[in-house]
Amino acid sequence: MAELPIPDLPPAHCSGRFTISTLLSVEEGGRGPYTATEGSSCDSVQPTHLSSSTLCSRTFGYNTVDVVPAYEHYANSKGVGDPRKGRPSLADLHSILKVTGAWLYPQHLCTCALSNSLPSSVGWFSLRSSSAGMVWPSPGVCALMASSPLSPQIRCMLNIWGVILYLRLPWITAQAGIALTWLIILMSVTVTTITGLSISAISTNGKVKSGGTYFLISRSLGPELGGSIGLIFAFANAVAVAMHTVGFAETVRDLLQEHNSLIVDPTNDIRIIGVITVTVLLGISLAGMEWEAKILFFLVILVSFINYLVGTVIPATAEKQAKGFFSYRADIFAQNFVPNWRGPEGSFFGLFSIFFPSATGILAGANISGDLKDPAVAIPKGTLMAIFWTTVSYLVPALALCVPPGACVVRDASGSLNDSVAVGSPGCEGLACRFGWNFTACTQQQSCRYGLSNYYQVLMSMVSGFGPLITAGIFGATLSSALACLVSAPKVFQCLCKDQLYPLIGFFGKGYGRNSEPIRGYMLTYVIAVGFILIAELNAIAPIISNFFLCSYALINFSCFHASITNSPGWRPSFQYYSKWAALFGAAVSVVIMFLLTWWAALIAFGIVIFLLGYVLYKKPDVNWGSSMQASSYNMALNYSVGLSEVDEHIKNYRPQCLVLTGPPNFRPALVDFVGTFTKNLSLMLCGNVLIVSHLQKLVESRLMADGHTKWLTKRKIKAFYTDVVAEDLRSGVQMLIQAAGLGKMRPNILVLGYKRNWRTASPQSLEDYVGILQYGHTGSSASGTLAPADGPVVADSHVPRHPLAPAVDPTTLASEHQASTIFQSEQGKKTIDIYWLFDDGGLTLLIPYLLGRKKRWGKCKIRVFVGGQINRMDEERKAIVSLLSKFRLGFHEVHILPDINQKPRPEHIKRFDELIAPFRLNDGFKDEATVNEMRQGCPWKISDEEVDKNRSLRQVRLNEILLDYSRDAALIAITPPIGRKGRCPSSLYMAWLETLSQDLRPPIILTRGNQENVLTFYCQ
């Protein structure tokens, strides 16, 4: 770290840097320690005075570019008008403090402060607090709601105290009995409590933004499951609007029916009233509903509860008795304690599916996460308090809502005052006979209009002390719940649309106004709600919602479990009162209940999830949310890699793991495509790049470029890694790559590099380096050898670049550049792949063409194998090779013996070879070895006369003639090249051999040389 003493200077503030003294002091006028001072400015060229040094020098006692911890260094977003702040880079810390006049500042460092145009009172805290939530007309209520858990608690309780509580709980009690009704409630509470704990953990693991449940799941599990559940949850909320609206319309219909004022008929009246109601609610939601109105709804519901409890102890009038209400009676309690199933819904899980939507309100608080100042505090406390109080309101009213109807109201009643009889009258059947009422006729004919099993408005007309208060409670509960769902669905869907995970839905993501209201989403929700309102049957709508919400709950719990089980360091929820195993249990229970409720609906829900999951997996959207799926992938890769290191290698499991010296991969697409063809979904491919740089600053650019190269490979659908090293020269860099690349058993065993076409004009040292790399590849690779695509029309100059690192290019620009097409991307047709297996290198020369032939593009090619032999033993040698190949099970049946491989080549070809090596001749006149070595001092690439006169050179010339005769029209040629012995074969001579082999050939040539270790076996153990 650069440190210099500084003179006493006037204090100067620096944006993003503060001292302990500034943390402890607050300036007059309400300006906090983060408030900008007058005269501060942002200048990226001329830093102001000490830039970052003055305040830090007061803290640490010396001048430093380093900064103390600050919030803005970790925030990835900023408010409107808030300047971007950040800690200095490593380059800044390594830079020298430059002295300019009387001031000191680090080079390459830009310091930014608030602009002079902004008022001095507008600081970070004021900007933050003014935009942290929705702007309500009532500041006092806003401050209370946005800063406390009361906001989500009231929303949750309003949703839970909804239509099911008032209109279906007494009916469920009549069907299931008091005992099983308690069990239904406890099962629902168990699922919601576990889910509430999971929501609390997820919502406190980082900053929560708008999007509610979708945001929580998608940022935890990733876009694959998050996107699918976002669509399902938004749809479920839209259907919930219809359910609560139908409950309201049903109550209004019953009031009209009591006064003989039906509009059309009972069913169509529900539809008419429901459509009108949801239209009014749409207008209210667009206009905005203040917290005062929601509190009013809340108070009305509480008053209706009190009114209901009072009504249970008021003696029953004759009119109420005719409808089945007799106040508290032990006989009635005993009869209603056991179930009495009736109708198509008459089963435990049928009633559970109808009741469960009342428990879905626990997500109402999370759905307004974008409107809360501190969601991490408000969501856990509000949700759990709402679960507690509503559980009390459901179970204690089993002291209040189950027991009173179950202990006060008989299951069947006619409602007629004429059915009054004397106690003990003959012919009277049923419990009501003990209380002086004969409902036998309507019970036997199943025509009773009243009683706990037949009349949904039990609370309103019979049990309550004052009926209109119950009506008001029903109106408040149903309308507030419908309104909450009408607001939640568009906001969740808007967040999903903005993430652009699915096509054709972005239209609904546009926001309007100051708060970016999803008006288009409101209209879509309205259309869905109207469609389900037309069903006009609450008992049919509720099970639909149950399955979708249970699916959401299952994924929420699984999100919590999965994030915990991955042991990611990023999983640090502030809420500690959760258990990963309880979350897993909640997820499993939710799934089981889904299938027990309606198995076909559960299959549809999971089918939708799987379809949407598959779509996102196929499209791979460009999002990175640090999900638990990423952490799980790392854990799996780590565990499998460690486990693989404990497994001994076997020839049967040999895979060609290639280190490809591509340099920047986009420079050599043919080389990348060739290796990617036979390694895809099979083995490891590493694209290596040697950066020859002399300045440390280039390292930062290389890291930026690495991301771009990886994206380029991904766009080209090449499954490969990119790695680079910084070295002083090419040869040492390649050696570093061979030694260090890979992990455990996932290490390269094949070195792949392009043919050096310009070897004749390149510098002698680069020629020595290239041949040295080939030789090192045989000794450095663990179990195979070297692939060198040689001369041919499609293989570019594929040697690794030796120039310094080029200026950095934006990774996105690099990935989006035009993708060049190569021959390895096209269909090869019915051509041939010719293998010249001239030397037994362990079988690598056979294995690579075999792997290519398994790919679709090369599948129609016929593979031919050529081997050397003697003319008088051709049949025996051919049978021996065919037998060997059959044992390898490669499917190579066409074998050719080359008896004329040792013939002398044509004179014109010999002359061409002599002209090729003439510039590299030492012309020593066949002197002794010591003299030759002395003459070759400083130029080891020179070729002595004795080395030229050997038969190996003529062998390469003759092989080229054979290749031209047999393989001129092949799709690919694979040859086992000769080995250039160290110290015995100059680099220029070896390159002349390779050049001669591939001369005048159109197809690409693959020079493949194993390191004499087997890569094929015909044994099964």
Image (spheres, helix red, strand yellow):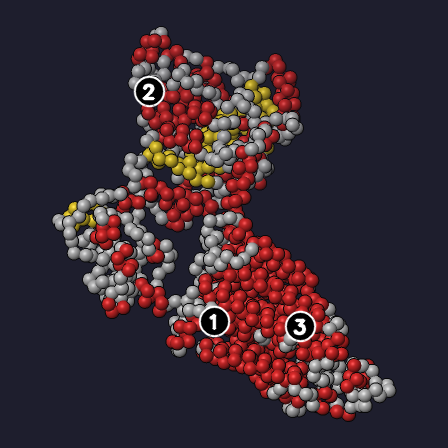
Q: Is mark 3 on a helix, strand or loop?
A: helix
Q: As displayed, is residue 914 above or below residue 392?
A: above
Amino acid bearing label 2: Pro
- Snapshot quadrant of residue 395: bottom right
- Residue at numbered disc 3: 540
Of the residues under marks 2 and 1, which one precedes in the sequence? 1
Which of 604/764 is in front?
A: 604
Residue picked out by circle 1: 150
Q: Could you tell which of marks 3 and 1 lies nearer the N-terminus? A: 1
**Left or right: where does residue 690 sit relative to residue 67?**
right
Find residue 258 and report its horizontal and vertical position in percent.
66, 89
Quadrant housing the N terminus = top left
Assess disc 3: are there few (<14), some (14-19) or many (≥20) residues with their C-alpha within 10 Å of its C-alpha: some
Q: Image check: 656 left or right of 692?
A: right
Which residue is more in the foreground, 131 or 414?
414
Q: First in sequence, mark 2 or 3: give its number.
A: 3
Q: Residues within 10 Å of mark 1 (few under 14, many from 20)?
A: many
**Residue type marked 3:** Ala
Q: Identify the residue at image location x=33%, y=12%.
A: 933
Name the residue tied to disc 2. 919
Front residue (pair 246, 184): 184
Determine whether 606 is above or below 472 in the image: above
Answer whether residue 243 is visible to the viewer in this image.
no
Q: Nearer the viewer, mark 3 or mark 1?
A: 1
Point 32% across, 67% down: residue: 126
Which image quarter: residue 416? Answer: bottom right
Point out residue 797 in the picture as x, y percentages from the top left corner.
Answer: 39, 33
Q: Which residue sits furthest right?
A: 426
- At a point 50% along the width and 64% down the height, the residue shown is 380
